[in-house]
Image (cartoon, rainbow, N blue to C red):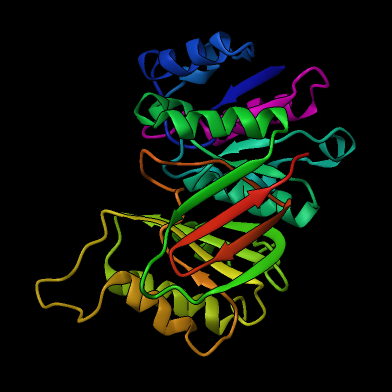
Amino acid sequence: MKIAIAAPARKVTPDEMEFAIRWLHDHGFESVFDNRLYSVDNIAAGSDTLRCSIIQEYMDRDDIDAIWMARGGYGSIRIIDKLDFSKFMKHPKPIIGFSDVTVFHGKLSRLGIPSIHASMPHILANKTPEALQSLIDALTGKPLHYEWPSYPLNRLGDAEGLMVGGNLSVLCGMLGSNSFPETDGKILFLEDVDEYIYHVERMMYALKRAGKLDHLKALVIGGLTDIHDNPDPFGKTVEQAIFDVVKEYDYPVCFGFPAGHQAENRAIVLGKTAMIRIGKENSHFLQHLP
């Protein structure tokens, strides 16, 4: 399997890529990239035009089996509308990443193409063995099955539906666009990092007021990493803030799903059906692939 590595947003260095390239080879994958990967334009991995052209090339190449985004940061939204998906649609391939790559996940979801929400090369060395194995399983079509402890605010229940979502902040920046995923009848996954509690609540209200939370099959909250409070306390945890926004609905809700900006970043195939069971002691997630 040939996996192209591209940087749609922030710049990367050869040292940051070394572990991931070796990891791919150690597991029987072939990495495809060139020195353009290390281009620099201020904080970005080259100009918008360059980054777009590299990703377009990999999208259009029939010999590339997947595109692994090198890192997130900010920048994908500047190029997503410049890409031509017509040839890609005839020979689709998964795009892999999370955080800022949520822009691509949303676009592919609207096109009916699955994508993989998973760890990225520049921080791969910091991920758990389980997270790394889950990416291999997602790439090779093995079932994904995760179990994690219950959380007091969970709303118990079972659900089955297509997975959509990603980073909450990035999703809110996509509201109203053709890159925002359809959420009606879907299982919505959300995670975020380095935000204030009131920011998270405001973004959840933005989704709610846009009608994106009304008809979910379930809401799955992943990592809420490095979340801050103000000097004058907000008065509730970030989990409570999220739950209060959706407490009027009756679909299952769970917290603590093992994916996001954390070492335990398990792979999820967005755009594929998943089953979730939220129980009193533990919750379970299952995806049969392909």
Residue projecting furthest to the right: 90
**Horizontal and vertical percent for residue 244?**
40, 84
Closer-to-camera residue (223/35): 223
Which image quarter is the C terminus in?
top right
Is residue 174 visible in the rendered structure shown here? no
- Residue furthest toward the bottom? 248
Q: Nearer the viewer, residue 59 or 194?
A: 194
Give the residues in magenta: 42-70
Q: Is residue 201 positioned above or below 257 on the image? A: below
Q: What x and y, as percent, mark residue 88?
A: 82, 36
Whether the magenta-drawn stretch holds residue 45 is answered as yes
Can the viewer see residue 62?
A: yes
The residue shown at (80%, 52%) is 112
Q: Per the image, is 48 magenta?
A: yes
Seen as rendered, the residue at the extreme front is 281
- At horizontal 42% and vertical 24% (from top left) the residue drawn is 40
Q: Is residue 77 above or below residue 253?
A: above
Res 235 quadrant in image? bottom left
In the image: residue 260, left or right of residue 117: left
| 263 sits to left or right of 214 | left
Residue at x 54% of width, y 47% of height = 146
Residue depicted at 47% across the width and 26% down the height: 121
The image quarter in which residue 154 lies: bottom left
Residue 135's x, y, as percent? 57, 32
Task: Please indicate whether residue 11 sits to the left or right of residue 137 in the image.
Answer: left
